[in-house]
Image (tube, grey):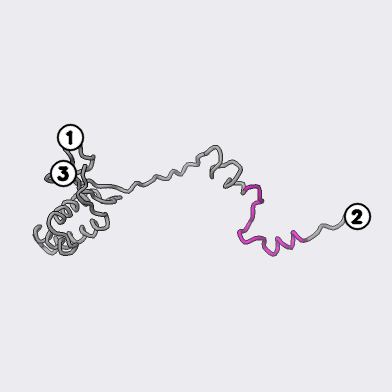
Amino acid sequence: MKSVTEFASFTLKAGLTAKSALATEGKTPEEVQTGLGEKFKFEGDKLKHFVHALDVAEKNLEDLKRVLVVSLAEGEKPQAKAVQVEEHHYVPEFHVTQKISHEKKDSGKGGRGGGKGRGGRDGGGRGEKESPWGLSPEQKAAKNKKPAPPQ
């Protein structure tokens, strides 16, 4: 697989809004392509690739990272969502999103999940403080107050 060019998602999103604005003005597809070339300063093959990449981006907009324009060698198979236009393939790449589980997992040893030691939940042997700013005046007075001697 040989990379020809790529277009970032923010460029493609701006291109899609410009394309829809030109289309609502009643421009022909050729005029839309020319308008996009003027706005984004693309010409020739780069402009042709940009217009085709916009079509691919329009179908795969959610979590889109970029669209790669590649040419495949003989015998190579395109990726799953790749779209072939003429001799080039337009491959959308997506951001990998991690799904956060709301289940409490016991990690066993160390780490944040439990156990004693650095980073454990018990605070490393130090007592639990009620306030991050220290003791309140009432707590200080109660602490400094000495018990009455036994009689």
Q: Which residue is mark 2?
A: 151
- Report helix, strand or loop for mark 1: loop
User: What residue do we see at 61% from left, 42% from top?
Assistant: 116
Q: Residues within 10 Å of mark 2 (few under 14, many from 20)?
A: few
Marks 2 and 1, the one that precedes in the sequence = 1
Residue 81: say if magenta. Answer: no
Amino acid residing under circle 1:
Gly
Q: Which residue is mark 3?
A: 84
Residue at label 1?
A: 75
Q: Residue at x 19, y 36 (%)?
A: 76
Q: Nearer the viewer, mark 2 or mark 1?
A: 1
Using residue 97 as the reference point, say whether residue 68 is left or right of it: left
53 in relation to 111, above or below: below
Q: Which residues are magenta?
A: 124-144
Please state the horizontal and vertical placement of residue 2, each as a whole percent of the image.
21, 44
- Circles 3 and 1, Cβ within 8 Å, touching? The answer is no
- What whole-number distance in Å separates the C-alpha atoms at marks 3 and 2? 97 Å
Task: Categorize mark 1 by other alpha carbons within 10 Å: few (<14), some (14-19), many (20+).
Answer: few
The one nearer the camera, 5 or 125, is 5
The residue under the point 17% across, 62% down is: 41
